[in-house]
Amino acid sequence: MLDFLGNLERTHYCGELRAAHAGQQVVLMGWVNRRRDHGSLIFLDLRDRTGISQIVLDKDLIPEGHAKGEQIRPEYVVAAVGKVRLRAADAINPKMPTGEVEIEATELRVLNDTRLAPFSPSEEAIQNEEVRLKYRYVDLRRPEMQRNFRLRHEITLAIRDNLSKQGFLEIETPILTKSTPEGARDFLVPSRVHPGEFYALPQSPQIFKQILMISGFDKYFQIARCFRDEDLRADRQLEFTQVDIEMSFPHQETVFAVAEEFLAAGFAAAGVTLPTPFPRISYDESIRQYGSDKPDLRLPSLVDVRPAFTDAALATLQIDPALPVVALRIPKVGELSRKEREDNHPLFELGKGAKFIDDFKRLSKGFPEAASKVRELVSADEADFVIIVAGDPANPIKASDTKIPGRLSEREINVYSAAGNFRTELAKKYADRHGAFRTTEETVQEAAALNGEKHLVDGSAAFRPIWITDFPMFEYDASLGKWMPAHHPFTAPHEADMANLLTDPASVRANCYDLAMNGLELGSGSIRIHRKDVQQQIFKSLGISDEEAHARFGFFLDALEYGTPPHGGIALGLDRIVMLLAGAPSLREVIAFPKTAKAVDLMAEAPTTVTDEQLKELHIRVALKS
Ligand code: ASP
């Protein structure tokens, strides 16, 4: 038999009670985390979002409550009325913040019972994530998830507050709108009122935020939901949240300063310092040093070991002398057996026209000088695992060799990125040995344990942000035979490279930037094109005709003609920021109701078919191949 809440009012949260509350009359409400039956005494651990308190049901004191207690199962919802008392010395639980006290209940109301869920929030997360997602309401009750969402709230609040202090106005932009070109597929929404026409969900607020600059708002921000129909990964969801920024009259550095400040504020809200300014590196240099445009600075960079080899040695080793020869070093891996090394081989991407040498013993036999020079160049300790990556003449790939003075060719980039990807994969595999990621885990744990204390944990070694600048403006898409924008097509080229737009697209640098942290892309932005003539030229260089440009972004091109100030901005992925600060392995741990890798919401069971009437109203017929 269930009880009513009646006029009972909660006085405290379960996690709040301390020795100082002893003697107070309290009313707690929550879920039964655990129940222990000691005959005439029943103990309930009552849980809410703040923590757990122990309730004592004494048969002599409240026979009726005690009888109810006998029926209670975990996850029942109850209200307990009673007096806080100090526990006997031998019953104190130092592991619980409320472990010095318990509540001697004088009344117990059972507000609801529960079906038996396939797992209990009082335990660690179960391995089967699909079950967790299906019963998300139960999963979210787990203290770890409660903590993640509290953290998310605090970080978001701090970022909002900081941006507001920096003079940014939060302005919402439409969800039902027109396609925004961010390089993904659109989600389309059929219009009932306009048969055969569709809205697109925004891939980002990009065009609208630029229009807000034309509208004179000067500084805009939005914690904006973006929708991109692409394949999901641990760090990608169909809908995700960005801290979206746009400002008028900025330079790149102006945007960096704004972003560094709000990010540091977000980190501080999570208890971690993030020293500013962040380092900067050009795209080419990032590729050279890390084989990636989202480098993880917690690990040693790649090292050019070309000088260790004579031309003859390269020829014997069948290494392309015209391409980079680099070494990567994973610290403290220790000696690997041949079998262990071979197990790593599938982690190397063969499609990039590169090869690797990971058998140093063998290399030392044939080329003792080169081998020791390589280890010296990468400053390898005995236990460090060193691998050489170089161009493979036997396995050339179709890529351009075009050398623009001072810039990397596509084939060079391929070799570097083969090395960079191998470095990342091996670093993941040997994380326990090199320990470079442990600092991050420890910092996150330390910050979590601060528990409202005001001082901050030093995050300088655990979180390594870096700005990547001077990206190429275009990427050659061999399958399409066209130069494609490497970013959205509103990104301005460097003023100095403008003249080469049509004649030498490969040489044009974009006035855009990414922020990477610990191997994750946190976000990107750019200085935008604010002149219609330049915008038209960019469309032209991208092979977008006037008609197409007009059909897709006509309203925006029109707007550009009405006094557009120079402007620029950035968007950082909020989910990713929270994921890093929560120490979570996946975005799904910091999004309340995420989709699976198969793009399904298992709890809501979306997507689903709809009724024939709904389809008819939308003038849509489904043509499924059976
Ligand atoms: N709209 C861009 C994105 O979503 C960010 C920007 O350029 O501000 O990645």
Image: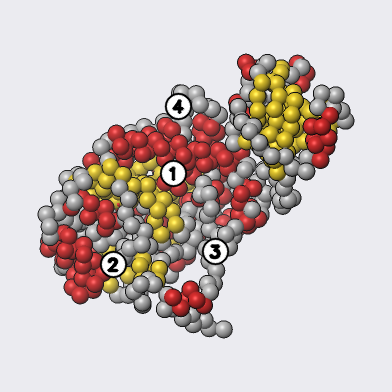
Measure how far apart labels 4 and 2 are at the Cα level.
44 Å
> CA separation, marks 1 and 3?
27 Å
- Helix, strand or loop for disc 1: helix
Marks 3/4 in contact by CB < 8 Å: the verdict is no
- Residue 348: percent from left, percent from top: 50, 60
Can residue 318 be seen here? The reply is: no
Query: Disc 1 or disc 3, which is closer to the eye?
Result: 3
407 vs 338, nearest the viewer: 407
**Could you tell me which secondary element the residue under label 2 belongs to?**
strand
**Type of amino acid at the residue the image marks with label 4:** Leu
Dot 1 or dot 3, earlier in sequence:
1
The first of marks 4 and 1 along the sequence is 4
**Relative image position of residue 226 (x, y in whole percent):** 39, 56
Q: Can residue 67 be seen by looking at this rendering?
A: yes
Figure check: 504 above or below 369: below
Q: Earlier in the sequence, mark 4 or mark 2?
A: 4
Location of mark 4 (residue): 456
Q: Position of residue 361 (x, y in %)?
A: 55, 51
Residue type, mark 1 in image: Ile
Q: Say above or below: 156 vs 498.
A: above
In the rendered view of the protein, which quadrant contains the C terminus? bottom right
Q: Badges 1 and 2: C-beta atoms under 8 Å apart?
A: no
Q: Earlier in the sequence, mark 1 or mark 2?
A: 2
Tell me how far mark 1 sits from mark 2, CA to CA. 29 Å
Q: Around disc 4, counting alpha carbons within 10 Å, would you say few (fewer than 14), some (14 to 19), or many (20 or more)?
A: some
